[in-house]
Image (spheres, rainbow, N blue to C red):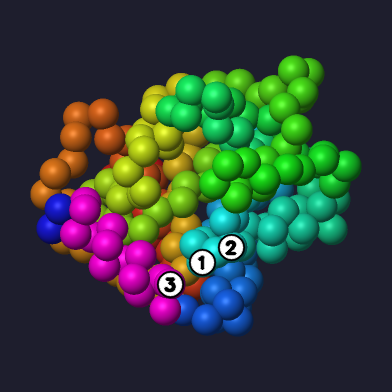
């Protein structure tokens, strides 16, 4: 299937989920992450802040658990730049002021001293609508994450999160050479790894 067809179908299924179901599955995603990955050993974890109206996975469950357990892993989140095509990344702490961008996505106030280089990240939690058996993903189509992931170090782990409890599709038919595959894919009830990672 094409990205466009997968995007439309998955978005429709996700929008049909109740807010309570999204919250429940997001809690389970948090459990999956901590069960299957060495979160406490990471130095830097990058994650997205959820856009609730799009029924995205609620990553605040992960954030609050890290803070509650006082883990040493530091958190980074993206900020869409004025060009509308690129991201910069900033540290998120309990004291970080947040504002909504033009799409309604919460972002930290961009302060130069809190900017984080993608090269130092140990893991990136990646939003998606669908994924195939080789780890290629379908997002919203802007290419933000593919450009960002190419800036990360060779050992960074790219982990997709989905509140749709669906297995990967066999193949996305229009994968581009610039598309960056995931190392793993988490749903509320399953964890899959791709390639040799």
* Between 35 and 26, the one nearer to me in the picture: 26
- Disc tally is 3
Identify the magenta region: 3-16
Q: Residue 55, which numbered label?
A: 1
Secondary structure mostly seen in the magenta stretch = helix
**Pointers 3 and 1 in contact (CB under 8 A)?**
yes
Sort mark 3 into few (<14), some (14-19) or many (20+) by Cα contacts within 10 Å: some
**Pointers 3 and 2 in contact (CB under 8 A)?**
no
What whole-number distance in Å separates the C-alpha atoms at marks 1 and 2? 5 Å
Secondary structure beneath label 1: loop
| Residue receiving disc 3 | 15
What whole-number distance in Å separates the C-alpha atoms at marks 3 and 1? 6 Å
What whole-number distance in Å separates the C-alpha atoms at marks 3 and 2? 10 Å
Q: Which quadrant of the figure has residue 177? A: top left
**Pointers 1 and 2 in contact (CB under 8 A)?**
yes
Query: In the displayed structure, would residue 81 be above or below residue 125?
Result: above
Does 113 sit left or right of 115 as displayed? Answer: right
* Between 26 and 156, the one nearer to me in the picture: 26
Q: Which residue corresponds to the image point at 18% horizontal and 41% vertical from the top-left?
A: 175
| Residue receiving disc 2 | 52
Q: Which residue corresponds to the image point at 47% horizontal and 47% vertical from the top-left?
A: 126
Instruction: Look at the image and tell me whether residue 7 can be seen.
Output: yes
Q: Which quadrant of the figure has residue 119? A: top right
Does 184 sit left or right of 46 as displayed? Answer: left
Q: Which residue corresponds to the image point at 44% horizontal and 63% vertical from the top-left?
A: 162
Query: In the displayed structure, would residue 141 be above or below residue 133?
Result: above
């Amino acid at each position: 299937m094409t990205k466009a067809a997968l995007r439309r179908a998955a978005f429709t299924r996700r929008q049909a989920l109740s807010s309570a179901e999204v919250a429940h599955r997001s809690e389970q995603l948090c459990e999956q992450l901590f069960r299957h990955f060495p979160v406490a050993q990471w130095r830097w974890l990058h994650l997205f802040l959820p856009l609730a109206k799009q029924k995205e996975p609620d990553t605040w469950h992960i954030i609050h658990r890290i803070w509650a357990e006082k883990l040493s892993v530091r958190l980074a989140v993206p900020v869409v730049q004025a060009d509308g095509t690129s991201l910069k990344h900033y540290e998120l702490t309990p004291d970080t002021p947040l504002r909504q961008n033009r799409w309604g996505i919460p972002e930290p106030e961009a302060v130069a001293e809190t900017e984080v280089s993608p090269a130092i990240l140990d893991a990136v939690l990646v939003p998606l609508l669908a994924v195939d058996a080789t780890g290629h993903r379908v997002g919203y189509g802007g290419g933000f994450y593919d450009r960002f992931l190419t800036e990360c170090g060779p050992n960074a782990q790219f982990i997709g999160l989905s509140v749709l409890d669906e297995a990967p599709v066999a193949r996305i038919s229009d994968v581009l050479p610039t598309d960056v595959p995931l190392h793993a894919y988490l749903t509320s009830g399953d964890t899959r790894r791709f390639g040799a990672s």
